[in-house]
Every structure is written in structure tokens, then in C-alpha cells.
Image: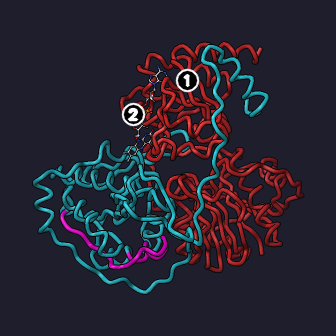
Amino acid sequence: MKILVCISNVPDTTTKIRFAPGNTSIDIAGIQWVINPWDELSLTRALELKDDAANGIKSVTVVHVGPAASEPTIRKALAIGADDAVRVNAEPRDAYYTAAQIAEVVKKEQFDIILCGIESSDYNGSIVGGMVAEFLGVPSVSSVSGIKFENGQPVMTREIDGGKETVTVPVPFVAIVQKGIAKEPRIAAMRGIMMARSKPVKLVEPVAVESLTQVLEYEKPAPRAACKYIDSENPAQLIGLLQNEAKVI
Amino acid sequence: MSVLVYTENWDGKFKKLSFELVSYAAGVAKMTGSSVTALSVGRVEDAELKKLGDYGAAKIVNVNNDQLAVFDSQVYAGVLADISAGKGSKIIILANNNTGKAIAPRLSVRLKAGVGSGVSRLPLNLNPFTVYKRSYSGNAFAHMEINSDIKILTLAQNSFDIASTPNTATIENTFVTIEASQVKTVVKNVEKQTGKMLLTDADIVVSGGRGMKSPDNWGPIVELADLLGGATACSRPVSDEGWRPHTEHTGQTGKIIAPNLYIAVGISGATQHLAGISSSKYIVAINTDKDAPIFEAAQYGIVGDALKVLPKLVEAVKEIKK
Ligand SMILES: Cc1cc2nc3c(=O)[nH]c(=O)nc-3n(C[C@H](O)[C@H](O)[C@H](O)COP(=O)(O)OP(=O)(O)OC[C@H]3O[C@@H](n4cnc5c(N)ncnc54)[C@H](O)[C@@H]3O)c2cc1C
């Protein structure tokens, strides 16, 4: 079996978001780019599955839709342990456009399991994974918090309201993963970093697809009123405020 | 033309989220001069279905088919695509929850409809059709244009006030043909907790962080949540340590919630934590460190030792609940 892990690169999660003039995009000056946290965890899980020879995973490939500037993100994924990578040489214009590009890659290279993170920490769309599956006409399982192999078949745990289900779907499929999929992201070791330099990154030109959405403008969240402090000796006062001022209890 | 809203049910019952969705759809319908069709899948009694009318649904389409007992995103997306085509819906609304996130993207590709996910306000503009959505994990909001003919919106939970706009809704029972072979998902096992309030449904959440020092100190957090009719939550290190179940973890990599009141106890307020709770209407912080970033997000704060403050809070709540 072959696994494909979709990775996007996003500003480090501690970044103070500022906008470029006109507020139509963020100010990228000084931003540290990282692999989207969910994607890093799916890659980790894919590698763990491959480590167990009994699962019969031949390779773990990462795919990224982005310009040359995002090469370091791909190299990082290779350093962590992915066998090879595909970069679709295009700005990811929106989720629909991006998913269509990934689906093309899958059609050509034939993967069995496609892992996508539940959301990217920039657009918070939660939609690319499901779109890829629909473009391919294959099943998708979302809210996946675990994936393992039983008798050579992938078995998933999916979160439902107030519980979880153990589910299977036939390969090929897309799993949209979230908390629980792996414990800690795997870290690139020196050897991995060295090896990453010579691992193949296949460059693919995008197919013509329109985008269906576009950000016109960003705004900051409304500033919150300054914090009102209550004496720690008199917490009853807090309850009074919550009851009579905020009216939330 | 109608606005189609997908209303999920839980064992045949709707909950606040369902009514929030219909209220939102009614707002969108008003803006666009159309009416609301609510779609319900599964076995729901007529009396329960009728409730959707109280929030503005003019028509309720009820689809019940044995093949829909298992949630298969491909099959569900197909049902929504068929119903929306039949009704000529140009705007389709779902919740931005597990189910909505599973269906919306598939439906998007099927209908070539752009998705505005996690919207928290009515559309800002109809031409160009512009939605207001969370981005950068709550550190920004985007005005996003959807330029396709059909639009899909997923509503952020607890972001829109329920409004009753009574309507005498008509119920239409529809049967859709689904072959058993179309259902690719096989559910081998289900583990469900019943009777416990879901974190995502709670109006009040009491949450503990590493400042609570030990899982043995959680008594007053649980008690406070119970007294207030709320749920308990925690920061990531707390669930990583196994002090609390992982289902309680809130933040960027955990649950994203928007209760009316979030009480953060012994939580520093890291950006990744705030990403999951910043849409709460009110945040209360209790922390020994007056410079902890959580106080910047909070409207009410107590600088002090949680282990001393909490018991007093519990007493004060008992006092008002008398
Ligand atoms: C990619 C990524 C994703 C992440 N996702 C999440 C996430 O989803 N959710 C999340 O929570 N974190 C997340 N984190 C971790 C996050 O950065 C913080 O480390 C974490 O939120 C800190 O948890 P805490 O506030 O409980 O602990 P700490 O930061 O250790 O804070 C403990 C606080 O308790 C206070 N305190 C100590 N003693 C007392 C006392 N007796 N009474 C009152 N207060 C006291 C201290 O002053 C301090 O402010 C993520 C990190 C990364 C890198």
C-alpha cells in the first residue's frame, strides 16, 4: 500500500498575525513557516504505520500545493521521514482549487490511503480532504482520531458526538484526521535532514481549475473590554458580576 | 428558490444547534427574499419536526431510509445534492461540526459550490456574496467572497442567536433510493457516553490548566461546572498528562468552543489555547500570575491561588442557587 500525506505550510502557531497594507493578505515579514500541525501529526502516523513491516506500507509520499518558496516545508517533511514528495507548482488559490490539484496527483500516482488534516491553521476551512475524496469519487472518513491495521486492512476510529466509532471503508480512501491520530509529531534527526537533501521532489504543473472563493479583506477580532479584577479574598463578587452584569449565570 | 438547511438530529431529537441553524437560515432567507427548507434525515416524529417551523422553516423535508442509519459522507452528500437540486436551492447551510465538515466539502465538489466554513455572522453582502469567517485560528476574520452560483455555508456553533419566527411549516416525507452497495462505510463498533453534557453544547465551561497542579485537585472544578449546569474542559498539557480525558482538551489542536461563559483556572492563555476559546462571550481567568496572557483575553479576572479561590467560588454559587 502507498500512503499520501497532504501538507500545507502555515505561519508558526504563535505568530502575531498582522495584515499587509489594504488588509487583503497577512504581512509575511518575519513569519516562521511550519508544517500545518495536523499534517505533521498525520505524517507521523503514516510513518509509524510504515515502520511496522506487517502493515505492508511500501511508501509514504507528501504532496504540497505551493510555490518554490515553500520547498523548505517539503524538505522538512522528507527529513522527518517521508520517502518522496510531489509539489504542485501553484499558489493554493482556494480549497477547491487546491483539492483539485491534489486529486490530479492521486489519479496519476495511485495511492491507497490519503491523509489530510482536519484544518489548516490559516484558512480554517476544514474542507480540502473531503473535496479531494469527492473529486476522486472515493470514500472519505472524517473526524478520524486513530488509524491502525487489522488483518492487513486499515481500521479507523472516528469521533462522533459523545463517543467514537470503529469504521472501515475500502481502499482507496481519504481519512481526515484530528486529535489523537498521533501523540507527538516526529522530529527530524540529523540523519534524516542529511538524507532529505537527496530525496526526490517531483514537480508538477497545475491543471486549469477555477477557484470558487476569495478573501476580500481581513479584520482583527473585535477588541475585548479590559479585564475587570476582583479581589481574590472575595470571589463572591465575581459571581455577582456574572449574574447581574454579564447575565451569563 | 429556497435556502436549504441541514438539521441534524440526535436519536430523533433536535437540539439548540438545530434551531440556531434554522434561525440563521431564516436570516439569510430574509436577506435574499427566499424561504427556508429544512432537511432532516432519519426517524424524527412529526411533532419534533414541526419545531423547526418555530424558527422560520417554511418547509421541512424528511428523508428516512434504512441505508442512512450509518453515516457515510458520500451517501449523505448525495442526498443533500438531490434535495437541493429538487428545491432549486442556491444557498445550503450546515453546522460546522463533525457532520457538517464531513458533508460540506463533498457537496461542494458535486455542486461546484464554494464553501464558507465557520461563518459566524449573516452574509456581509449579497453582491458580491461575502461571508464573515474565522481564520488564522481566531486571530483574524476574513471577508470571503463566494463566486459560484450555489453557495454552501457552515455555521460556527453558538455564534448566532436563536430567534423564533413562527411559521406553519409543511412536512414533506421523501424517499430517496440508495443501494446498499453505495454505503461504503462499515461501522464495526460504537462506544457512546450517554447522559453527559457535550462540551460543544455547554453554555458554561469550567476549564483547568497545569496550574491546578494535580488531577486530585479537580473536585471543585467539576463541582462548579455541575452547579452552573455546565461542562468541564482543560488545556492540552492536562489531557496529555492524562489528568483529564482527551475529549476535554480545548484549543487549536483540541475542541473549538464558544460558550457564553468560559472560566479558565490555572491556564496561562497560550495562543494555541486561546484559538479554541476566543469566541466565548465571556472569559473569566483565575491565575496566580498577574501577567499571564489569559488576562488579556478575559473580561473578569482574579489574581490568586486557584486552590484557595475555587472553594470560595463554589460556596458563592451555592449561595445564589439556594
Ligand atoms: C502546535 C501546537 C498546538 C497546541 N495546541 C494546544 C491546544 O489545542 N490547547 C492548549 O491548551 N494548548 C496547546 N498547545 C500548548 C500551548 O502552547 C501551551 O503550552 C498550553 O496551553 C499551556 O497549558 P497551561 O496553560 O495549562 O499550562 P502553563 O502554560 O504551564 O500555565 C499554567 C498557568 O497556571 C498558573 N498557575 C500556577 N499555579 C497556580 C495556582 N495555584 N493557581 C492559579 N494559577 C496557577 C501559572 O501562572 C500559569 O499561567 C499547543 C502547542 C503547540 C506547539
Q: Which residue is mark 2?
A: B237
Q: Quadrant of residue B204?
A: top right
Look at chain A in the picture and name its colour: cyan
Q: Residue at x 51, y 18 (%)?
A: B305
Q: Position of residue B250 (x, y in %)?
A: 50, 40
Front residue of B284/B247: it is: B284
Q: Which residue is mark 1?
A: B303
Q: Is mark 1 within 8 Å of ligand 1?
A: no
Relative depth, front residue between B194 and A109: A109
Q: Which stretch did the figure color magenta?
A: A83-101
Give the side of residue A231 with respect to residue A10, left or right.
right
Q: Is residue B212 above or below residue B28?
A: above
The picture quadrant for ligand 1 comes to: top left
The red chain is B
Q: Which mark is residue B272?
A: none
> Does the rendering let one see residue B232?
no
Q: Is the CB atom of the residue marked by disc 2 within 8 angstroms of ligand 1's nearest atom?
A: yes
Residue sitting at x 19%, y 52%? A188
Q: Mark 1 or mark 2, which has the lower sequence index? A: 2
Residue A23 image point, x, y percent: 56, 68
